[in-house]
Amino acid sequence: MTSEFAPQIPAVSSLAEGLSSRTFEPGTDEGGKPDASTAAFIRTVEYGFYEPWYSDEQLERLHPVFNEDAQELTGVYVDRGFAALEPWGGALETVGFDPDHPVGTFVDYDKTINAGGAEPLPARLITGVTVNPSFRRRGILKHMMTNRLASAVEDGMALAALTVSEGGIYGRFGFGAATRLRGLQINASAAGDGFALTTPPVGKALTVDPSKTKDVLKDVFAQFHANTRGSVGRQSTYWETGTARWDPENITSWDRKARAAVHVRDDGSIGGYVVFTYAGWDSEPSTMRIRDLIAVDATSRIELLRHLAGMDLVDRIVTPNGSPVSDPLQHALVNPRAVKTTSLGDVLWIRVLNPVAALEARAWNADGEFSLTISDSLGIADGVFTVSISGGVAQVTSTESATAPQHFWLDVAALGSLYLGDVSVLTLRDAGRITAEDEADWAAFSSTVDLPTAPHCATHF
Ligand SMILES: CC(=O)SCCNC(=O)CCNC(=O)[C@H](O)C(C)(C)COP(=O)(O)OP(=O)(O)OC[C@H]1O[C@@H](n2cnc3c(N)ncnc32)[C@H](O)[C@@H]1OP(=O)(O)O
């Protein structure tokens, strides 16, 4: 991969007088508990997301989330001089405002994203973004985001990524919605619109103790991550309990309801796992909830669903955390109405920082040549780029002006949406997000860029 492209660092917006920001690594005190700065930071995130007030025990359990994978924490703090600012006047000290408690939080760390090319690409993942309600709409997010994107560029990152609480926030910073997940409701009963597959069983699904199979789960995920366009590497804490995610309603329980099964293929290898909880015999309808289902191929995925649907005392299976958009299940059923889509929503948002490295790491559907003019209001990824694909591998060069016969214009957020193949070229054209000269060959461009299946990000962060 060549990377002669030298992106500019965006101008860093300054904070209002009385506010300062600092980036630090999470720390631990002598007793192994979060140190004061880290604890105050975690509590601010908790407050920003309207989480219940954590007990000390919960705080300690959460600490690894902030402490692992070399995460960096950026907090915006109120200087003592802030009392001069309106509209609070001198009231902050009067009410005991804690200057060590940040009013803005931002967490970033590095993992890889599978863009469909030969190797997953390192990416800067952003999470834990909050601003105290009393300090919102004063540019604190803008300050943290522009600073931390500049830092990612300096560190040579080609991509940044996040998942969003609201869809209207991050487009202005160059992020585009890049993958989606479907929520499914599967009728597990045999009657009516019931569950029956068109193919006979393959291999064997076996129940396992999720608290003892962490290594198996990690290994299956590693294979999935290597094979699956759109996949994002998981935080270490994903595996801590073997349940892949905590019980969001009760963080102290570590989900004792969790059960798991693996699919053992005919050659004895593990092809996938499912972690699930049962709502109880008296739930109406009696419901099995999938917490995490990762399979290295479609066969293992279908076999795990067959296993769940075949269990007694279960009327339906739900996947609130989502199934892939290109899910073969519906077409493997005798009665496709046994599965219903209950939701469809974006998951991963991509921000291209270095178009040369990013486009060279992407999958392509066919050989071709074109050039792109990318606009970027933050000045990170803008420019003209010639893309030449041969044997499925792209060579990308940054040029002064377009030389390729086919030339297209788009902004960096549209490039983020196009990047992993979740949306087609023609859909973005019809939305006015990609433009070209009248004589442009849209058919050739789309057959090079569009990918045959939807990307699948199964990691929540
Ligand atoms: C990756 C994640 O962690 S996603 C989670 C995001 N956090 C949350 O949803 C928690 C609750 N919300 C918050 O904490 C805050 O409102 C934040 C973080 C969303 C915004 O912080 P603020 O400091 O108020 O944002 P800031 O003042 O820097 O605004 C920057 C721009 O975004 C816009 N903006 C801010 N919040 C929103 C929003 N919710 N919807 C649409 N636009 C928004 C502002 O209008 C401003 O626009 P401009 O550039 O055109 O002037």
Image (cartoon, grey):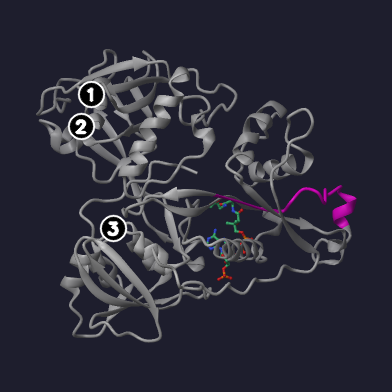
Distance in Å between CA atoms under marks 2 and 3: 23 Å
Query: Which residue has dot 3 on it?
Result: 363
- Label 2 or label 3, whichever lies nearer to me, is 3
Q: Whole-percent x and y of residue 121?
A: 42, 54
**Count of marks placed on residues:** 3
Amino acid residing under circle 3: Ala
Distance in Å between CA atoms under marks 3 and 1: 29 Å
Q: Residue 98 magenta-drawn?
A: yes
Whichever of callouts 2 and 3 sits on the residue coming sooner in the sequence is 2
Query: Which residue has dot 2 on it?
Result: 299
- Label 1 or label 2, whichever lies nearer to me, is 1
Whichever of callouts 1 and 2 sits on the residue coming sooner in the sequence is 1
Q: Is 353 situated left or right of 407 in this image?
A: right
The front one of 210 and 152 is 152
Q: Label 2 neighbourhood size at 10 Å, few (<14), some (14-19), many (20+)? A: some
Residue at (43%, 58%) from the top-left corner?
350
Query: Which residue has dot 1 on it?
Result: 265
Classify 33 as above or below 433.
above
Q: Is 444 situated left or right of 95 in this image?
A: left
Callout 1 secondary element:
loop
Can residue 315 be seen here? The reply is no
Q: Whole-percent x and y of residue 276?
A: 38, 24
The front one of 65 and 217 is 217
Q: Whole-percent x and y of residue 212?
A: 46, 17
Amino acid residing under circle 2: Thr
Whichever of callouts 3 and 1 sits on the residue coming sooner in the sequence is 1
| Mark number, residue 415 | none
Mark 1–mark 2 CB contact (< 8 Å): yes
Q: Label 3 neighbourhood size at 10 Å, few (<14), some (14-19), many (20+)? A: many
